[in-house]
Amino acid sequence: MTPRRKSLGSTWRWIALAGLMASTTAQAADPAGRLNFVSCPIVRDTPQVPCWITRYKGETYYLGIQQDITADFYPPQLKHRILVEGVVANAPRICGGIVLKPVVVSVLPEIDLRCDRILPAGPYRIDFNARGAGPNRGGDPATGPARPPRGVPSVAADAGPKTFAVRFDFDSDYLTLRNSAQVSAAARYAAASPGARVAVEGLRAATLLSDGKSLVEKAGIAEQRAEKVAEALREVGVSATRLQVGWRDVATEARGVDDYQNRRVDIRVTP
């Protein structure tokens, strides 16, 4: 049997109407230009590649362009709202929008038929990354030059305990290419030491929005993430007898600064 712990802490209810709850935190301008908000994604259909933007409080913000699955930016979905967590960048507008860099975009699961806007290209072009056949190899002025394809680094068997953070979109346990690479890295690290113990712990989080409200992930998501990662580890060769699986269902307190980093599973490998 797979050793596991019980859920740490009592299960919280998903607080507030439509996932939002009133917060006593006063809204204040972030000197770093940080913005956290919920909005609808919008596609601007430029001739080169679809450009994703959004609007918040009367302003337009650039999120990213449609690229292949190795890119940091995963395009959102129409007919769903998105949680945007980003910082205003000192960069020229792209597709008519203020650039957010870095930016994390999570697709919220509920259907919202109002989020269905596709705009014509107008005067806008994406000359820095015209999409062709095959994987994208271009660059992005908002994110810098394209990086080489990701690989899993080699590991040493005697490097000591190491933690791998597998991050998730808001309210999601979906393993993307980005976070599954961390699972593979953890498995390789464990394989380098046949007696290694592997502890998996799922976390649940909240995000403090710029309007002073908080968005809290649903109860049970920490367990779902932990079980999903544990299953993935077993699939790539980690023995179930070496796995310890646990989770913390109490949401990590939202601070409005990099709250997305708390939506994760930690894999602790101890040689």
Image (tube, grey):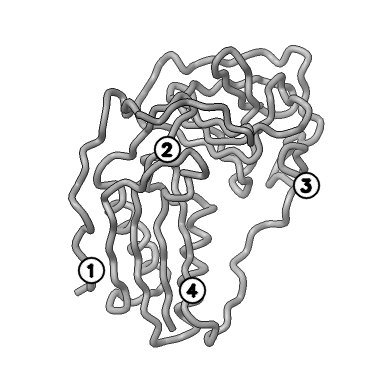
97 left or right, relative to 238: right
Q: Nearer the viewer, residue 10 or 246?
A: 10
Q: Residues within 10 Å of mark 4 (few under 14, many from 20)?
A: some
Front label number (2 vs 4): 2
Tell us which disc is closer to us: 1 or 4.
4
Q: Quick check: 111 left or right of 255?
A: left
Q: Residue at x 71, y 42 (%)?
A: 143
Residue under the image location 35 percent in, 66 percent down? 200
Q: Is residue 180 above or below residue 168?
A: below
Mark 1 and mark 3: span between their CA atoms?
A: 43 Å
The residue where tag 3 is placed is 145
Quadrant of the snapshot with the N terminus: bottom left
Which secondary structure, mark 3?
loop
Callout 1: SS: loop
Q: Earlier in the sequence, mark 1 or mark 4?
A: 1
Residue labelled with disc 4: 162
User: Looking at the image, is mark 2 or mark 3 nearer the viewer?
Assistant: 2
Q: Amino acid at mark 3?
A: Pro
Residue type at numbered disc 1 = Arg
Could you tell me which residue is drawn at 28 percent across and 39 percent down?
218
Which residue corresponds to mark 2?
207
Q: Residues within 10 Å of mark 2 (few under 14, many from 20)?
A: many
Residue annotated with mark 1: 4
Of mark 1 and mark 2, the one earlier in the sequence is 1
Q: Position of residue 12 (x, y in %)?
A: 21, 42
